[in-house]
Image (cartoon, rainbow, N blue to C red):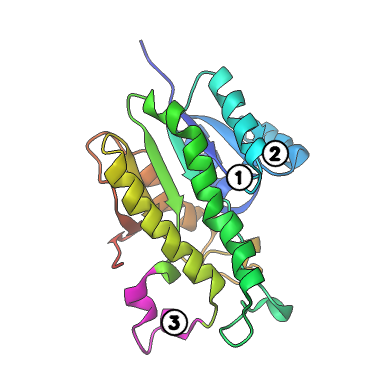
Amino acid sequence: MTTTTTTLITGANKGLGYETARRLVAAGHTVFIGSRDAERGRRAAAELGARTVRLDVTDDASVRDAAQAVAAAGGLDVLINNAGIADRAAGNAEVGAAEVTADSVRTTFETNVFGVVRVTRAFLPLLARSAAPVVVNVSSGLASLNRVSAPGTPTYAYPGVAYPASKAAVNMLTVQYAKAFPNMRINAVEPGFTKTDLNGNTGVQTVEEGAEIIVRMARLGPDGPTGGYFDAEGPLPW
């Protein structure tokens, strides 16, 4: 008997999440579009031949209801924690060290870090029942302490604080979850500087290029890597 892989993608009504959903639907996955805005989620799902579930990663009740809805539909095999925000000032520049505030960092972490914890915790019982559970955490090259510390590189020159710090935290969550759940494939990925609303469409890659590593890691088998940090070219330095 053939079983279908069921995948949930947070923040999937546009950008990288939308393109990842499109690719996974084409690969035969049953995909749930997680979206804060129910109507946008419904439109995206209709366009892609996917399902939709209202999911605000910053809200406990929303996440709990989404987990119940996915469970009622049959369970979950792949979770892609894609929803994310950046701390942007006027002109779309991310707020630097001289101007950053605790409140702005807290807001960024609420979505990018606490949202990952909230969603992962809610869906762990469903993933535990899958024959080949996978979690993909969408991180960033800016999460690499090694890269951000290397003078003369674009990563070193990046002045923002909240977003890189949040994604570095996502990397640590990835490692700790992977150790705690060795039967799951849990990895962090760096899509690259992709043209999306997150960066005011200033990225240099298309969403098709950016989604490549997300899709690849979402399709890992039980013998695939876990607890790693990857871009399309391979493993990245922490």
Q: Which residue is drawn at 59% across and 88% down?
A: 98
Residue linked to disc 2:
41
Q: Of the residues shown, which amino acid type is indicated by label 3? A: Pro
Residue in the foreground of this view, choosing between 161 and 60: 60
Q: Is mark 1 on a helix, strand or loop?
A: loop
In the image, residue 177 above or below residue 198: above
Camera-side residue: 118 or 35?
118
Amino acid type for the residue under numbered disc 2: Gly
Q: In this view, does 36 lie to the left or right of 20?
A: right
Dot 3 falls on a residue whose secondary structure is: helix
For the residues labelled 3 and 2, the Cα–Cα distance comes to 34 Å
Residue 84 position in % (x across, y down): 58, 57
Query: Residue 85 or 212: which is nearer the viewer?
Result: 85
Residue placed under numbered mark 1 in the picture: 12
Which residues lie in the magenta part? 144-158
Q: Can residue 48 be seen in this view?
A: yes
Look at the numbered discs 2 and 1 and tell me whether their residues touch, using CB distance below 8 Å: yes
* Mark 1 closeness class: few <14, some 14–19, many ≥20 residues within 10 Å: many
Residue wearing tag 3: 154
Using a 10 Å C-alpha cutoff, classify the residue at mark 3 as few (fewer than 14 neighbours), some (14 to 19) or many (20 or more): few
Q: How far across and how far down the image is residue 39, in percent?
A: 77, 38
